[in-house]
Amino acid sequence: MAGVIQTTVRRSMPASLLLRVRHRSPGLANGLVGGALAAGLGLAAFTVLVMLLWVSSPYPDSGPGGALHVAAALWLLAHGAELVRVDTLSGAPAPMGVPPLLLAVVPVWLLHRAARDTAEGGARDNAPLMPGRTAWAGVVLGYLAVAAPAALYAAGGALRPSWAWTALCVPLVALVAAGTGVWTAYGRPSGPLEQVLGAVLPRGARHLVLGPDGRPGVAARAAAAGATVLVAGGAVLLTVSLGWHFGETRRTFGRLTEGWSGWLAVLLLCVTLLPNAAVWAAAYALGPGFLLGAGVAVTPLGARAAPLLPPFPLLAAVPDPGAGTALHGTVVALPLTAGVVVGWFVGRGSVTGGGRFGVWTTGRTAGAAAFAAGLCGVLMALLAGLAGGPLGTAALARFGPVWWQVGLATAVWLGLTAAATALTVRAWRLRRSYRRGERRADRVVAPRRRPALPRPARRERLPRRTWFKRKPGRSAPAPAPVAADQPYLLLDDDGDDRAHGAPGDLRDLRDLHDGTDPFGLRPRPEPLDDLPTPSPPAAPGDTEPRPPA
């Protein structure tokens, strides 16, 4: 029996090994599972939406298999992949490459969360994180492992993915979104960004994009603010134009479909395309405008009639054909406002956020404003490229703004306005700071010092009468020593006060009539005739006591 017990003990796992197994770092398998789960959740969300619309449709064109093919195709379209429609009237395949920007939020957010959670590995407290490259590679590979069968399945439907665009866009989105998730899990370190900026920008311009503390630099914040103002202003212009053409917008719903289910489907499609339309409106305000087909440009200077346009509610907001009027020219207020915002950010940063350069010179301030305008142009060019694409062949081969024209117009508009605004804000802030400094210099105020309290001398207790003698065998506690550096100690120790008549030691009612204070204070002095006359002090060398005089 002892041998059995000994064998069992030998086969048991040590406690240290159990802890290591329990707290071990997750491997590549967790990343694969996280990426596959992110892809599966995205496909499930699109499938549920499409199936709901298919079920509610009174006249579906195909069965549930066709709805599933459409859901897979829309999931790929959300990544930026171009789709091809094969069942056209002419028989020629027609591309469809306008990805709804709102749908792109779903796969990007799922990938970001999957990569972040995988890198953290459920770690708590001070547990080590998963290696970043392992988490990144695992999530991307797991995601692509699900995306490839989904693309093969979507190829059998009416909307087939373009293999070239699918092979480019889906892995690119997976790499970027998963990379940002791992970067977030590690606390957003500035090392990777510094390496990328070091290979792209010169040394003097890096601090404008990435500050010394790892936060976005002055130019990066200004560019983001300018792009936000442009897109938000484009949304406002879109809303105003839809309200101006409200009658046409309402009639397009009846032309497209009948019944509440069809109207709901069209409304959902319009909602997913709202960010695209806001970018189109911003491009219109910047000057280049957008295209409604090959050679059909819509700008503030004029708009040409676009043939073969489908009746769609968002297209009802397009200005009427003809030359531009003064009302159309008022849209230039949007890029001017964005330039002022960019210049305000740069001008404020030139005084307060200069870093190691201190207060920037006028040349550096103007250069930073131009650099921020260029960054904003890059952002707007990227958004314009994503918001447009083809909707067919021939006349419908190009829809939306031209990305390089939008980027160039943004850099020109915002560069001029932002430079002037930044210099103005810089001069105003410096002047205000100089004025404050002059007032402080003229106003001479004596330094406020704390008054020094006189150091009290050591106090000696005066002889005082006691009406009652202490009981023999009971000794009062010794009084606490009074330090010489306690200027606020004005009363004696409580134990000593009780020995000389504290409030708790009243033993006769005559104390209230003989001048003795019941609270232990010294009584009012009275003439003391019966006290002996104190003897004079002894000489330094005299050791014998002298008799009283």
Image (cartoon, rainbow, N blue to C red):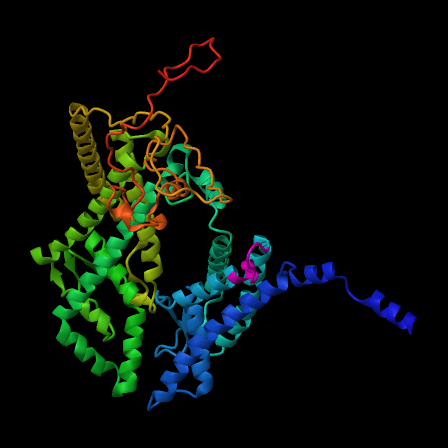
Instruction: Let me know if residue 78 is in the magenta part.
Output: no
Looking at the magenta stretch, what is its main secondary structure? loop
- Mark yes or no: residue 158 visible: no
Q: Position of residue 440 (x, y in %)?
A: 19, 27
Residue at (24% x, 58% y) in the render = 232
Work out which residue is located at the far bottom of the displayed protein and give it.
58
- In the picture, residue 373 is in which quadrant? top left
Please state which of residues 51 and 532 is positioned toward the viewer in this rendering. 532
Q: Position of residue 104 (x, y in %)?
A: 39, 65
Please identify the quadrant where the C terminus is shown: top left
Work out which residue is located at the far left of the displayed protein and give it.
326
Please state which of residues 76 and 203 is positioned toward the viewer in this rendering. 203
Relative to 507, residue 444 above or below: above
Is residue 250 rendered to the left or right of residue 547?
Answer: left
Relative to 280, residue 96 above or below: below
Residue at (40% x, 80% y) in the render = 50
- In the picture, residue 126 is in which quadrant? bottom right
Is residue 256 rendered to the left or right of residue 120?
Answer: left
Is residue 532 rendered to the left or right of residue 164?
Answer: left
Which residues lie in the magenta part? 117-127
Work out which residue is located at the far top of the displayed protein and give it.
541
Instruction: Let me know if residue 122 is in the magenta part.
Output: yes
The total number of labels drawn is 0
Relative to 362, residue 14 above or below: below
